[in-house]
Image: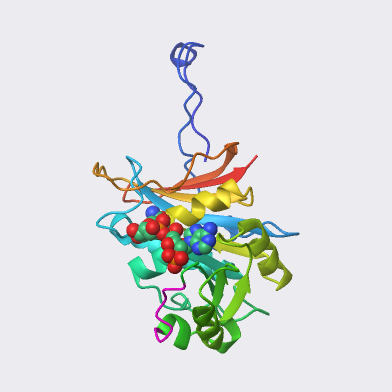
Amino acid sequence: MHEPPLDPAEQPTDAEPALRPLAAGAPVRPADAYAYPPGGPWLRANMIASADGAAARDDRSGGLGNETDRRLLSLLRGLADVVIVGAGTVRAEGYGPVAPGPGGWEKLRAGRSPVPPLAIVSHRLDLDLDAPVFTEADPRARTIVLTTRTAPPGRVRAAAERAEVIVAGEDRLDFAAAVAELMARGHERMLCEGGPRVLAQVVAAGVLDELCLTVSPMLLAGGAVRILNGPAVPVPPRLRLAAAYRDDEDYLFLRYVRR
Ligand SMILES: NC(=O)c1ccc[n+]([C@@H]2O[C@H](COP(=O)([O-])OP(=O)(O)OC[C@H]3O[C@@H](n4cnc5c(N)ncnc54)[C@H](OP(=O)(O)O)[C@@H]3O)[C@@H](O)[C@H]2O)c1
């Protein structure tokens, strides 16, 4: 649907901000709108922030979201080959293994494992290895642990009994190397669900291709972190707005890709 042309008398002047409405038009088919670009590895992050930039409400991101956001999160998981997430988020949000969305993912994941594995970033490996995130993961999508050479050896051995362990980096995970290891295992469509400390390092390592950002229409103040939490990125990547959607509850769904 095209907007009617503005009356010349109403045309913005050069001095006015060049604003554009969020395009009105036919509803999008989300699986197409969020399909990974063909040909090659792609690392996308999916995060939510309040309108004043808070990445958590009462220490959880769920308090910021709504049903549209939850469905989008599920769709993005269904599209991905692997879901990378920090141990802090696994602990804070009580992550279990990825479960198929309502209606199933048969078509979405034809030729792939029924669900993507989680790849949990951790140095200390202070993880409950008896939790469902390890014990109830589909054997075709075993949980992966991304860790470091100096991680506690006993915990590495214990984790290896419940998960696939990938080691990259000495004291800190080398994110570029870890991503390369995931790609080498055929996980080319990667989704990072944060948290903010992990995402800051993913960006600093220069491996983020896309940010799916939900803007939640809330103002929280307080001391909540932003969606990136870490030292200033030396060369901040410039992003291009690839798509912007909204729902009926005033949530914004932005897709930024690296220029
Ligand atoms: N707004 C959103 O979209 C969103 C998304 C996700 C999470 N959150 C919120 O963010 C909070 C959790 O985020 P967070 O930033 O504290 O935690 P996080 O980024 O999920 O995880 C941090 C943990 O990851 C491991 N880690 C990080 N960098 C590492 C490295 N270089 N090498 C090895 N291990 C590394 C460490 O685990 P070990 O301690 O085990 O070594 C560290 O404690 C929660 O409140 C959650 O609700 C918000």
**168 over 217 or under it: above or below:** below
* Residue 88, picture quadrant: bottom left
Q: Residue at x 49, y 80 (%)?
A: 155
Split into quadrants, the picture shows ligand 1 in the one at: bottom left
- Percent of width and height locating residue 71: 42, 65
Q: Quadrant of the C terminus?
A: top right
- Percent of width and height locating residue 64: 31, 54
Q: Residue furthest right?
A: 39
* Residue 157, picture quadrant: bottom right
- Percent of width and height locating residue 249: 31, 51
- Percent of width and height locating residue 99: 46, 78
197 or 3, which is in the foreground? 197
Q: Residue at x 34, y 51 (%)?
A: 248
The magenta span reads 125-131
Q: Is residue 193 visible?
A: no
223 or 190, which is in the foreground? 223
**134 over 199 or under it: above or below:** below
Q: How many marks?
A: 0
Is 128 magenta? The answer is yes
247 or 170, which is in the foreground? 170
Q: Residue at x 23, y 44 (%)?
A: 222
